[in-house]
Image (spheres, helix red, strand yellow):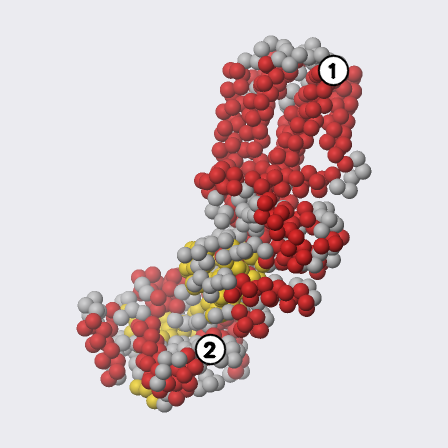
Amino acid sequence: MSRAGGRLVANLADWSYLLYQLTLRDLKARYKQTFLGPFWVFGRPVVELVVYVMVFSVFLRAPSDGVPYGLFAYSGIVLWTFVAGGLSRGARSITAHAGLVSQAVFPKAVIPLSALAGAVIDALLAGTLLAVWLAVRGASASLELLWVVPIGVIVAAIVTGLTLATSALSVFYRDVTHLVDVGVRIWLLLTPVAYAASVVPAPYRRWYDFNPLVALFDTLRRALFGGAVPAPGALVYPVVVGGVLLVAGALVFRYAEPFFAESV
Amino acid sequence: MPGTVSVAGVWKRYRLRERSLADLTARLWRRSPPDPRTAPSVFWALQDVSFRVEPGTALAVIGGNGSGKSTLLRLIAGMMHPTRGAIGATGRLSLLSHLGGGFHGELTGRENLFLQGAVLGLRRRELRAKAGAIFAFAELEPFADVPVKRYSSGMALRLGFAIAAHLDPEILLIDEAFAVGDTAFRDRCLGRILGFKAAGVTMVLVSHERYLVEQLCDRALLLDRGRMAAAGTPITKNGAKDNYVFRVSAVDELVDKAMLQYAQKTFNAKNCGMILVNNPWGESNEKGLTAALAAKGMKAAGIEKFEGNDVDVVPQLSRLKAAGADCLFLVGNVGPSAQVVKSLDRMGWKPPVVSHWGPAGGRFTELAGPSAKDVHFVQTYSFFGRQTPVGDKVLKALMAKYPDIKGPGDVTPAVGVANAYDAMMLTALAIEKAGSTDGPAIREGYYKIDRYEGLIKTYSKPFTPENHDAVNENDYVWTQFIDNQILPVGMNK
């Protein structure tokens, strides 16, 4: 029964096979009847990279903290692939699976989580290209690369919290998906994906740093390109934001879930 | 105990309109929201439904389109939650309904099988073991690896049924799933379902197919516009070949006729208006009253609806007043009826009000104020006033048995007590006539009852094969609520 409530996590463990099946199905369905098939996983970030290099490096000559611009931008794109893909697909996940939601009994959180899992897989595959690139440049495997793990977890917490809330609310108000799309675009511009945070003038920096992704993308670059050692203190703020969003999102979802079947 | 389904006092409300910015701004600016009568915003799909299905038994849910059957199944399945009340279903559930709805067209039959199976809570190992049998049952073995979008609709339905039918449920819910596939496949489905029944699986079945209902089900529940139809007009005229439903209670259809009769006789009413609560009960009485008026060549001055939680019915009543109504027919429970009375007070309008039995629920004086007494409503019995010997006997027996009952005012609700008393005595007589406690014999016994001096009246041939209603419009008494007591009209004078 779906009276999941507080036992959300235990319940989800029981339904891990469904999570796996849903993720697999989305992945398969996304690339079926496409000519390039799975190459789209690389195609999209690479096309984005080419445009970024043109605009930011060639036209605008944006500084990239001493790292070749292409590599700098691509590392951001990989992480952003997860944020943007997760948020936009996650928000419409419940409404896209209306058939399942209205006809079967299972913890509905499996659906947005599978959308996020799909985005994680996309980012990981795009990430293999980054790993190859780093290896070719002769970067040695340093311990600092392990920072990628906590960064990924914190970003996942932020995105998961937001997605639980937006996917649930969009069942009742379809406006939410439009809002998410606009929000993702603005967030991209306010996050150091295509440029280094160091270009932001000092007076604006206080406000700019309210975006929890700033510290996360910054730390990612330091870990990958061996700049200054990442400062754990910088991650306190993103961790708090991630925790709050995760709890808030889960509460919203839990409150709304009983009404999905009749409203979707 | 696994396999038990219990439904207790369940209500389900649907929202009909989408929430939009217009509602929000209306609330912010305190403008009135869209007129609820032109655009009803909520709909009660189920009202106060209760029953219990014991393990291994099968219940058929019957009723017309829109009577709430599918809603009931989806609530039992746990897909939706009741607005009020509680549902318990212990054991593994499987619901056979709009099958194939959850398939993904781009994926193959096999991929969909694994996905659908996962949705229904199966593990990979179980699905692997069953995949062969499922495709064989659906006769889709050659198409297992073809995308479902290339299936015909019949093929998709067959696959859906085959998956659901291989779940080994403890409780099987079936929602008209039998319009599936060709005759041979239907027979196989039916065979599978009979097999479940033989294996002791509890079933709740929604179907229009008489054969299936009779073959499979131990009991039937008749839903009429979201209500259990026991109080509704059709329950005694349910069309069953062996009809076992007998009633000793007022009947909506007859109450409506009686309301008109009373209004004409007592108030010389010529132009009656209706003020009805906006729910299926109000609707059914709108039909009944309209028919009763039409039978006498009359028309309503106006028909107005109000919501059960409205506190101001003045606009509706003003329209009836403007239409020249000289008498009002009121249908609503205690609370809503009280709001009508208060609104009339505010308008300073005092038309005669003839009401269904709604106010009898209690505390009407308290809720409606002093004008409560102006509402005349229908009952089948009152313990006040001159009593028959039977009435005296029952009242004395009640006072002797229950110390809290000190007089006729303490027997609440009087109608319920009277109906139940006569029904029980009539049943005892039927058993006596039958000389047996066998169902069919008792049924014949009811028909043999010749004369019985009861509480509501002296019954003479109360039941015939054509008529299972013992009480009719001639047996109603008209009452008023005075100082929180239901008194026959005229007693206070």
Picture layout, residue A232 above or below residue A105: above
Question: Which residue is drawn at the image coordinates 38% and 75% (left, top)?
Answer: B378
Question: What SS does tag 1 mark?
Answer: helix
Q: Do marks 2 and 1 both belong to one polypeptide chain?
A: no
Question: Which residue is drawn at the image coordinates 27% and 67% (left, top)?
Answer: B483
Q: Chain of mark 1?
A: A
Q: Chain of mark 2?
A: B
Picture layout, residue B101 above or below residue B63: above
Visible residue check, residue B41: no
Question: What SS does tag 2 mark?
Answer: helix
Question: Which residue is drawn at the image coordinates 43% and 72% (left, top)?
Answer: B231
Visible residue check, residue B401: yes
User: Closest to the observer: B116 or B253?
Assistant: B116
Tag of residue A136: 1
User: Can you tell which quarter of the image residue B250 is in?
Assistant: bottom left
Structural crowding at the residue carrying mark 1, measured as other residues with C-alpha within 10 Å and reported as few (<14), some (14–19) or many (≥20) = few
User: Closest to the observer: A231 or A178?
Assistant: A231
Tag of residue B236: 2
Pinpoint residue B327: horizontal percent, then vertical percent. 44, 74
CA gap between label 2 and label 1 equals 85 Å
Pinpoint residue A152: horizontal percent, then vertical percent. 59, 25
Query: Quick one: which residue is furthest to the right in this view?
Result: A35
